[in-house]
Image (tube, rainbow, N blue to C red):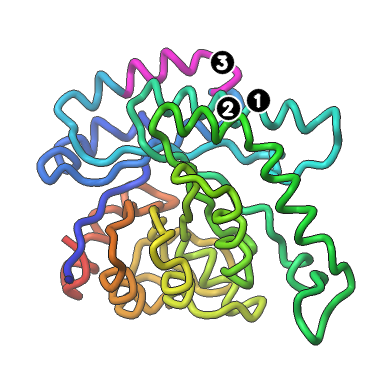
Amino acid sequence: MLPLKIGAALMVSHLPTYRDWLIEAQRDLEIQDFFRPEVLLGDWRGLVAEARRQLDGFEGRLGIHGPFYDLPLDTADPEIAPIVSRRYRTAVEAAAALGATQMVVHSPFTTWDWFNFGDHPRRGNAPSDRERKIARTQALLRDAVALAEAEGVTLVIENIEDIDPAYRRDLAASFASDAVRLSIDTGHAHYAHHATGAPPVDYFVTDAGAMLAHVHLQDADGFADRHWPPGRGTVNWHAVFRAIAALPQRPHLVLELRDAADIPAAMTYLTREGLAC
């Protein structure tokens, strides 16, 4: 039922500004610093300690954004894959130390994949590539998923270039683990809809169904990954929020904006439209 309570994806440095807003309603929160290579290769435990200090009194649902720069989940090179695998495991360690229950990872599926996989009557250039991509992703994330299961962390796979949301859903389901679920980025889906022929954003939500555990809320114009506050672009927010409200579960809902200072503007718009609180 609308309106839905939403939170935000923030850097630790933004927590003093939004701490009271987060705590007064115990909103969803995603700490984003952990996608930076220098963080996971450096003193991430110090950052965890600082975040925990800033979040004294916070009892909302907590997640982190995992690494993704140059770390594709389907890495095939036998020398590089162990490095990538280790980085994801380290990120799960950081999430567990923080007390987070989710970690966002990026989908391995590309625009090229959709046009070349062999499971469509108008295509079929590389019929076995989809299965190989799933197998490589399972192998690379095996240690991270095992640790996530032990620590009570869920990996949520976010759409990036995805055209067919079923590919990502099938990938998540292939792990047969409660520690792997789906994430949707509304701006990414809106870009894919306009630029590459993907379905509209609300269709991504409906396709994910009970597997959807996390949503990045950001507006865009369908041309690029804008990360604007809702109301500034052309996402059909009423359709998106109705689709989320119809789910049997409540995924983490966080504003992921290019400028954290736009959070008040986003909340003003979504509150006025009766969608969020």
Q: Which residue does the image show at 42% across and 70% down from the upper left? A: 205
| Figure quadrant of residue 21 | top left
Relative to 263, is 120 above or below? Answer: below
Q: Which mark is residue 89?
A: 2
Q: Which residues are magenta?
A: 40-51
> Which SS type dominates the magenta stretch?
helix
In the rendered image, residue 97, in percent from the top left (x then y), is placed at: 39, 20
Query: Residue 223 or 151: which is nearer the viewer?
Result: 151
**Left or right of 127 on screen, residue 95:** left
Query: Residue 135 or 195: which is nearer the viewer?
Result: 135
Q: Which mark is residue 86?
A: 1
Are circles 1 and 2 on residues that touch, CB within 8 Å? yes
Q: Which mark is residue 42?
A: 3
| CA distance for labels 1 and 2 | 5 Å
Amino acid under label 2? Arg
Q: Of all residues shown, which one is farthest toward the left?
A: 24
**Left or right of 2 on screen, residue 82:** right
Relative to 26, is 160 above or below? Answer: below
Amino acid under label 1? Arg
* Label 3 packing within 10 angstroms: few (<14), some (14-19), many (20+): few
| Figure quadrant of residue 151 | top left
Q: Earlier in the sequence, mark 2 or mark 3?
A: 3
